[in-house]
Image (cartoon, helix red, strand yellow):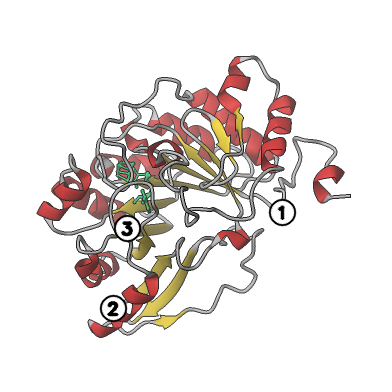
Amino acid sequence: MTTLALQTDPLAPPLLDAQGRRMTYLRLSITDRCNFRCAYCSPASWGGKKDLLDAPELGRIAALFASMGIRRVRLTGGEPLIRPDILDIAGRISRIPGIQHLAITTNASHLASLAVPLREAGVDQLNISLDTLSPETFRRISKQGDLAAVLRGIDAAAGAGYASLKLNVVVMRGVNDHEVRALVEHAHARSIVPRFIELMPFGQGTPVPTAELVSRLRDEGLPLSPEPEEPGASAESLSSGPARYWRAATGRVGFISPLTQNFCGGCNRVRVASNGDLRSCLGGRAQAPLHQLIRGGASDTELARAIRQALGDKPEGHRFTEPGNGATLLPMMGIGG
Ligand code: SAM
Ligand code: SF4
């Protein structure tokens, strides 16, 4: 008999997937709209959908997952900070018993004014996306973004007392791969941990393998030594994640390598897309239509059963590298990375 079959109360922990991995981390996409149009993420003509979850629905879903064992929630998008009710959403979720960390992934365009209010609303971790320090390259990548506003936002976050700040850089060959050293320096000067991400095949651009970036940084005078894996880091640990960290004299440097070092083994995450569909895997199709069920009057127990059923189909790992997958699976704008 599997561990899933042993679960009697659908609302109680643990929340396990088909592989028996314990889910402790919920990524909640709160909008599929964005004020940028990054070529690797956004379909050129993306207008966004209307059926977004409202703040009370998002609070209900987060509380339901917390009762089932989720301990960390990340708000993502699209761009989560363009929602006018973002402080209401953050406050509701940070107050849920059992939620130990509330994180946001943002392009930083609205952080100059929101860094302090979000911290006060209970957000304790920010991942900020910044691929370049060049205004021309920034416009080329984001199409609509203003680099100066983003840099002001990053400085505001650095001064707002967050427990964890990370700078996510998607590296594209011939576009920003020559800037990795400068981005490490920009981040470390603000006590932020930079993380370089291998481009996943959702849009345009050519990825650069992590191993090449590590040698490049060493060749450019930044000696790096690998950090030992955290003792106790496992699928059940809150710290378990896809990044592997290296140490430089000025601070840590992270690498996320979905293409060359599949990180799925210790997966502890479950995703809810901006239309309210639960996605068991970033690169998979198994899902439960949570928003539809809520609108149909489903009870918490019925929602919990639907969640467990979808997780019963969660694959062992993503399949981006298989021919024909990638861009066809889902638009990144709706699922939030
Ligand atoms: N708008 C926010 C932002 O840009 O940080 C949050 C949403 S965005 C979809 C979340 C993360 O996914 C960002 O760090 C972004 O750089 C990353 N991302 C988007 N498309 C990607 C791709 N094709 N490959 C790797 N990372 C990607
Ligand atoms: Fe918007 Fe973030 Fe996607 Fe760029 S990566 S288009 S900022 S959602």
Graded by Cα atoms within 10 Å as few (under 14), some (14 to 19) or many (20 or more), the crowding at tag 1 reads some
Q: Nearer the viewer, mark 1 or mark 2?
A: 1
Say which mark, if any, is on residue 19. 1
Quadrant for residue 109, please give it.
top left
Q: Which residue is mark 2?
A: 217
- CB at disc 3 and ligand 1 closer than 8 Å: yes
Mark 3 and mark 2 lie on one chain; the one further toward the N terminus is 3
Residue 176's x, y, as percent? Answer: 21, 62
Residue visible at 20% across and 69% down? 178
Question: Looking at this view, is 233 or 198 the one in front?
Answer: 198
Q: x%, y% of residue 334?
A: 42, 35
Query: Which one is earlier in the sequence, the residue at label 1 or at label 2?
Result: 1
Q: Secondary structure at mark 1?
A: loop
Question: Closer to the N terminus: mark 3 or mark 1?
Answer: 1
Q: Is residue 116 visible?
A: yes
Label placed on residue 170: 3
- Viewer-side residue, 44 vs 178: 44
Residue 160 in view of the camera: no
Look at label 1 and name its amino acid: Gln
Residue 50 shown left or right of residue 24 in the figure: left
Mark 2 burial class by Cα count in 10 Å: few <14, some 14-19, many 20+: some
Q: Viewed as shown, does residue 14 lie left or right of 150? A: right
Q: Amino acid at mark 2?
A: Leu
Which residue is found at the position 69% from the left and 31% from the top? 306
